[in-house]
Amino acid sequence: MRRRWRGGKPYGWGLALCAIGACSGALRVPQEPPVSATACTLLQAPSIVADTTTITFDALGATREQCALTLAAEGLRPWPLASSEPWTVHLTLTPTEALVRRLDRERARNAIDAGSPLLATEDPDLTAYAATRADLEVSPLPWDRTYLRLSPRSGASLGGAAGPDAVRADARPADAPPCEVPPTTLELDAVSSARVVYDGSDRTARELAERTVALVERSDATAVGLTAAELDVALHAGNELAYVISVPRASYCDALLALAQRAPWMSPHSIIPLIDTRAHAIAPRAPRP
Amino acid sequence: MTFRARMSVAFVVAALIPLAVLALGVRREVTRRLTAQHERRVGALVDIVRQDLARESASIAARLEILETDLSTDDRFRLGAVRSDPGHRRYVLDWAERAMDVAGLSMLRVYDDAGRVVSSGHFRNEFGRDDSQLLARLAAAPGGEALIAVKTPSGSFRALARAESTSVGGRAFIIVGGTRVDSGFFTRLARDGEIDVSLALGEAGVPATRAIARLPLVYVDDRAAGVATTHLTIAPRADELQMLRRDLDRWVGASFLLAAIAGAILIAWLAAGLSQPMATLARAALSIDFNTPDVDTVAARDDEVGTLARRFAAMTRRLRAGAVRLRDAERRATVGEMARQVNHDMKNGLVPIRNVLRHLSQVQERAPHDLATVFGERRATLDSSVTYLDELATRWARLTPRADRRPVDVNAIVRDIAVAARDAYATPLRAQLSVDLPPVVGDPVALRRIFDNLVTNALQSLPADGGAVTISTEQRDRVVRVTVADTGHGMTAEEVARALGGFYTTRPQGTGLGLSVVRRLVADHGGEVHIDTAPRRGTTVVVELPAHPHRQARISHS
C-alpha cells in the first residue's frame, strides 16, 4: 500500500508504482503505470515527524538514489506546514531505506557547501546555485504534480489562467490528459465568498492563488491558505470563489475522480488545469572515467 | 433631634461641605490648567507631525532615487524587462520584492511605459495589470505624492506613495513606492502618545469634534476618477487627561471618606463624653429621692458636664431641704384641715338635732301633753343624725376615711336630707325624684356628705325674705344627675373658684369647706360637679355620678 501522510492523516500517496522511465515526462495519455523490473516501489507509508521521515522502498532495477529522489519528490512535496520555504529535502540512504530531512534555504546551501549532498528541491535559486558547482550534477525529476483551479460557479469571471510565471518553481503550462469527470446535478447558490483558497502548506498553490486574485475582477478577492481538514470542508461546501488544488500527474484522472468525491459540485467546466511542476535532484557528479 | 444627630449635622455643615467646595474648586482649576497645558503641548506636537510627514515623504523619494539608480544598472533586469529574455523573466518578477525589502518600503511596483505592472514587491503575482489610470492620477497629485490603496493577496492597505520615472535601455519605467499608512504609522506620528492621529477615511478614528488639526493628504482611489483630498486628523488623547481627572476624583473621594470616618469617630467620642453624663444626670433626676442621699457619678469631672453635675447636686440638696420643710408644713396644714372638716361635719350633723331639741322645747312649753307625740315624730330625725355623727366620728377616729363602696339609692339619701332640712330650716325644700333612678356605687356616708353640704349651702344662701331650694334626681344615659338649685345670692366666677379651693365662705360661722369637700368626694366617686351661678340669680349645682351597671343591684339604705 502506498499512502502519503500529512499531519497524521493519510491521503493519496499518488501513483502506486512509479516507473522511473515513465515518470520522465513521457506520460501523455491515461494509462496504468507500467510495472516492470525497473519500477521502484514504496514498501511502507512514511510518517512525517517534524522535519524528518523515512521511506522504505524497493529500487528493483533502478538506482537506489534515483528511486529515492523520485519517491521523495512525488510523495513528500509539499512538506506539511512549510509553505513559506521552497521545498528541499536531503536524503541519506541505507541499504533498505532513505532518511529524508527537510531543509530550509540556508541549511540547503550549507549542505551543498559541505559537499556530497543528495538533495531533491523545487527551489530554482538553489538549483541555479548547485549548477555553478562543478562537483554537483543537477537533473530534473519527472513532471509529477499538476495544479488545477476549480471554480464552483461557471459564471464567475476569474480572468486569465495563472501560468508558470506565477510560481517560483520549475513549471510549465499544464499538460493534462483528457479525463471523464461525471457532470454534477448539484446547484449552488449564486452568492459566493471572495476567497481563493488553497492548501496552506503548498507554496506553489499559494502563488497560483495569488495570481488568481491579481487577475480576478473582484477587488475584494483574497487568497487564503487552509489546513487539509479546512480545505476538505471548503471543497465540499463549494462556496468559495475558486480553489487551487494539486494532484499527482501520473494518476491525474483517478485524482480527479477522487476530487469529485470531495467536491460534489465539481463538473468538467469547473476544472482549469494551470501548470505542471517538477523538482530537481542535486547529487554528486560521478567521477569521470 | 439627638445630640449625636446635631453633631453630625454640624460636622457636615462645618467640615464636609467646605471640604467639598474646596475639592471641587481645586479639581476644576487643576483640570483647566492641565487641559490648557496639554493643548499647548499637543499644538507643538502637531508641528512635529507635519515635519515627520514631510520627512517621510522625503525619505520615500530618496529611497526611490536609489532604486532608480540600481535599476538602471541592473543588467539582469535589463535583459528580462527590456530584452524580454525568458531566462530572466523570473528575475524581473522578483526584483521589486528584493528591492522593497532592501529599501524598507511597504509597497513597490515597477511599471512599464504602458502603465502595466512589470514587477511588484508586495504582490508578486499582480504583474501585467494595467494601472495607467492610477499612474496618471498619481502624476497629477501635488508633489507627486498621494495616499493610494494597495492591493495584496490577503487584502489591501493604504500607503503614502510617490512615483519616480526612470529609463532603462531606452525604455521608460515608473517606480512607485511607499510606506504603509496604518495604525503603526499613526503611532509613530503620535510620538509619545499624547495625541491621536487617524485618517478621515471611515476607519475608527478620533471624532472630528475632538480634532485640533487636520493635515490634508491627496488620496488616489482606483475606483474613482481624479484625485481627492482627505485629512490626517490629529486630536489630543483624552486618556491621560481623563486619567488625571480620575486620579483627582479618587483622591477627593478618599479625602471625603477619610473626613467622614474621622468625623464619625469624633462625633461618637464627643457624644460619648456628653451623652452618657447627660443620661446619667437624667437617670439621677428621675430617681431623686428626697429621703436618701444622692450618689454623684459625674461630679468628679473637671469639664462643663462636671460643673453641671455639681450644680445639679447642689440643687437637689436644696430641694431636699425644701421638701423636708414642705412636708412639715403639709403635715400641719393637714391637721388643721382635718380639724376644720371635723368641725364642719359635726356642725352639719348637729343642726338637725339642735332644731329637733328646740322644737321639743317649744312643744314642752306650749303643749306639754303633745311632747310624747312630737318626740315620737322627731325621733327618726334624731336617730338619723346621731347615727350620722357616730359614723363620722368613727371614720375621723381612723383619720383616713375608708370608703365603703356599695350600690346606693340616691333618692333615699335625698329624702333623708329633705326631711332633716324640713325640720331644720323654715324654708321648705322641694324634692323632685326620678322614679326609675338606678343606684350608684358609692359610700352612703360620703354621698350624704355631698348632698348635705350642697343643700346646706343652698338653704343658707337664701335671703331672709324667702326663696326656694329644689333638689332633683334624674338619669341621663348612664349617669345619675342630682341637681340642687336655689334662688339665693349666687356667686361670681371668682367666688366659685375660691370656694372650690376651700376655706372660703361668706358666712361668719362657715368653714369654707363645703364645695371643696363636695368636689373631692364626687371625684372620689368618679363623678363630676357643674356649677351654674351668678350674683342675684341663684346657684344650680349638678352632681353627675356613674350609674350602677345593674339596675337591679341590691341597694343599701342608709
Image: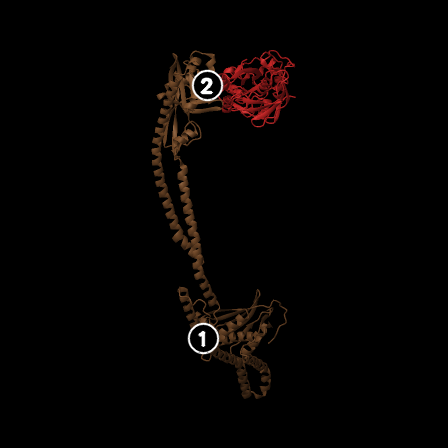
Chain colours: A red, B brown
Looking at the picture, tell me which residue is in the foreground, B104 or A226.
Answer: B104
Q: Which mark is residue A107?
A: none
Q: Nearer the viewer, mark 1 or mark 2?
A: 2
The answer to which of B410 and B281 lies nearer the viewer is: B281
Relative to B544, is B199 above or below? above
Instruction: Say which residue appears at 58% left-offset and 84% top-offset.
Output: B374
Specify whether residue A268 is in view. Answer: yes
Q: x, y (%) of residue B416?
A: 57, 76
Q: Amino acid at mark 2?
A: Asp
Q: Quadrant of the N terminus of chain B?
A: bottom left
Q: Quadrant of residue A273?
A: top right
Residue that carries the numbered disc 1 in the rendered image: B326
Q: Quadrant of the C terminus of chain B?
A: bottom right
The mark that comes first in sequence, 1 or 2, is 2
Label 2 belongs to which residue?
A: B94
Residue B525: x %, y % from top left = 55, 70
Where residue B514 sits in the image (x, y, percent)? 49, 75
